[in-house]
Image: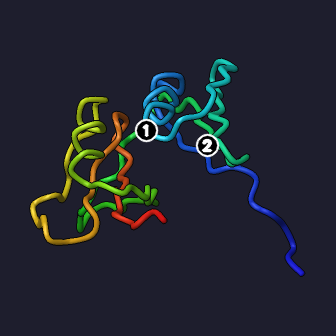
Amino acid sequence: MSLAKLGVVVLDCPDPLALARFYAEVLGGTVEDQGEWVDLKLPGGQALAFQAAPEYVPPKWPGPDGSQQFHLDLDVPDLDAAEKEVLALGAKPLDVEDRSRTFRVYADPAGHPFCLCRIDLV
């Protein structure tokens, strides 16, 4: 028996609405703006939340003097197509040089690292 259940993953950022809209374009879902807190309700009942952090400093990836803090793995059937879309939405490549791998690493517009991971959808 667990002590708790995960409610939501919350990302600190300078502009919660802008970052929620970025992830809504990537993952789908509905953005619910509450000012300094914005929820992204995802299909299937999951959610991400975004919280205003005026003194926000983006994580460093990779960085010996900083930590990535966390990252999201986003499963996609086609890495090239997904890469084109996230770059158009404002993501920045962090580690995409090795095209033989099953994942590529990017930063969202606020600097949080995330991976596009190739999976075979059945």
Q: Quadrant of residue 110?
A: top left
Q: Residues within 10 Å of mark 1 (few under 14, many from 20)?
A: some
Residue at 62% x, 34% y is 40
Q: Quadrant of residue 109?
A: top left
Judging from the image, what secondary structure is the residue with disc 2 in?
A: strand
Percent x, y of residue 90: 28, 31
Percent x, y of residue 33: 65, 20
Give the tally of numbered discs.
Answer: 2
Residue placed farthest to the bottom in the image?
A: 1
Residue at 16% x, 58% y is 96
Look at mark 2 in the image and give the residue it sits on.
48
Mark 1 belongs to which amino acid? Val
Alpha-carbon distance for marks 1 and 2? Answer: 12 Å
Frontmost of labels 1 and 2 is 1
Residue placed farthest to the left in the image?
A: 97
Percent x, y of residue 53: 52, 32
